[in-house]
Amino acid sequence: MNSLKPMLLSSLKSYDKSQFFKDVTAGIIVAIIALPLSIALALAAGVGPEAGIFTAIVAGFVISALGGSSVQIAGPTAAFATIVAGIVAHDGMDGLIVATILAGIFLILMGLCHFGSLIKFIPFTITTGFTSGIAVTIVIGQLKDFFGLTYPTGVKPIETVEKFEAVIQCH
């Protein structure tokens, strides 16, 4: 069970003023990047900006308190913006809360079962393709705003293909 001990408990034993100032500097840098990104991803997911800020702050503290590394940095991920948008559009905020709780439970169970070590069996092409797919999804999601377009009346696309089709229909 010693392997499940959060790194915070070990780090506090030798924590000093110098380390505190390094942590504050790192925290400010991460916040400068994470907070605006959290707001943008919340808006892309169809929820309010306050949900993005709240999530980033809470997740940051939870990850730093319970993480297994003293140098772990976590932040918002664009990979789930489309998934969250679909959940919010189909099931509302209640559905998003349930999905988040279930995802947390699954992550804890997978961690307890040491499933993280299974990543070595996933081919490089799969992880690269997944990352490239996320990039394409983000680019397509930003086309409307980049070109200053307005979707046709009554069109509110959620899925990536729907967004691409709506951008094509814009005049």
Image (spheres, grey):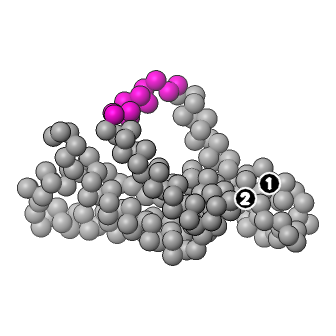
Q: Residue 118 location, x and y as percent?
A: 41, 28
Horizontal side of residue 19 vs 57, given as left or right: left
Residue 55, picture quadrant? bottom left
Q: Main secondary structure of the magenta part?
A: helix
In depth, the one of 31 and 41 nearer the eye is 41
Residue type at mark 2 is Ile
Residue 120, picture quadrant? top left
Residue type at mark 1 is Glu
User: Quarter holding the N terminus?
Assistant: top left
Q: Residue 23 location, x and y as percent?
A: 24, 63
Q: For mark 2, what is the residue? A: 158
In depth, the one of 156 and 38 nearer the eye is 156
Q: Is residue 54 above or below residue 142?
A: below
- Which label number is shown at residue 76? none
Asked if labels 1 and 2 touch by Cβ distance under 8 angstroms, the answer is yes
Residue ID at (36%, 62%): 60
Q: For mark 1, what is the residue? A: 162
In depth, the one of 165 and 1 nearer the eye is 1
> Which residues are the magenta region?
113-123
Q: Residue 119 location, x and y as percent?
A: 44, 30
